[in-house]
Image (tube, rainbow, N blue to C red):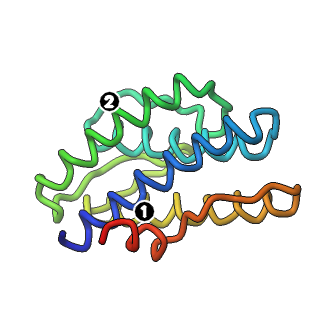
């Protein structure tokens, strides 16, 4: 599997792992429920930018699990489509504050991969500090599952 496809598979796996973990082990933890929602809402917004769709700008809202699962299904499809697209294509968009920006599809995908990984790490720290045993969601843990 090529590197980018592998990293996207890791991102989707890690996000799903944490979505299930939060809703089974800490459904009332405000921080964890907000962070897993944030990861998925950010992915949704980036794909809306790529597809020139109106933005669902609620990037820090806390969504119910069923809605997050629907977003997950949709973004996983969009990741698959992105892997078949021109990764050098430049997208012009506006940040949520209105500032105009431009990024290649490859840079956007790399951003989403690192964004999710960053927040999953924060969630693991928070879970451990609050007496929970966070799931193993590192890239190396994922890569071992793949073999």
Q: Residue at x 43, y 26 (%)?
A: 70
Question: Which residue is the extreme one toward the right?
Answer: 130
Label 1 – label 2 distance at C-alpha: 21 Å
Comparing labels 1 and 2, the label whose residue is closer to the camera: 1
Residue furthest toward the bottom?
Answer: 140
Judging by the rendered image, the residue that carries numbered circle 1 is: 113
Quadrant location, the C terminus: bottom left
Q: Is residue 90 above or below residue 69?
A: below
User: Any mark on residue 14, and which?
Assistant: none
Give the x, y percent position of residue 43: 44, 45
Residue 49 position, x and y percent, is 34, 41
Identify the residue at horizontal 62%, vertical 24% (top origin).
64
Q: Is residue 81 left or right of residue 142?
A: left
Which label is found at residue 53? 2
> Is residue 61 found left or right of 16 in the rendered image?
right
**Quadrant of the image for the N terminus?**
bottom left
């Amino acid at each position: 599997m090529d590197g980018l496809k592998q990293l996207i598979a890791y991102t989707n796996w890690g996000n799903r792992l944490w979505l299930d973990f939060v809703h089974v082990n800490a459904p009332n933890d405000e921080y964890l429920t907000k962070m897993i929602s944030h990861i998925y809402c950010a992915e949704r917004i980036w794909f809306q930018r790529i597809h020139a769709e109106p933005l669902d700008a609620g990037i820090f809202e806390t969504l119910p699990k069923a809605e997050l699962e629907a977003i997950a299904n949709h973004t996983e499809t969009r990741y698959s489509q992105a892997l078949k697209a021109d990764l050098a294509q430049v997208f012009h968009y506006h940040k949520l504050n209105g500032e105009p920006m431009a990024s290649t599809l490859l840079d956007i995908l790399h951003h989403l991969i690192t964004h999710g990984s960053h927040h999953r790490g924060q969630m693991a720290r928070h879970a451990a500090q609050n007496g929970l045993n966070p799931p193993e969601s590192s890239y190396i843990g994922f890569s071992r599952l793949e073999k």
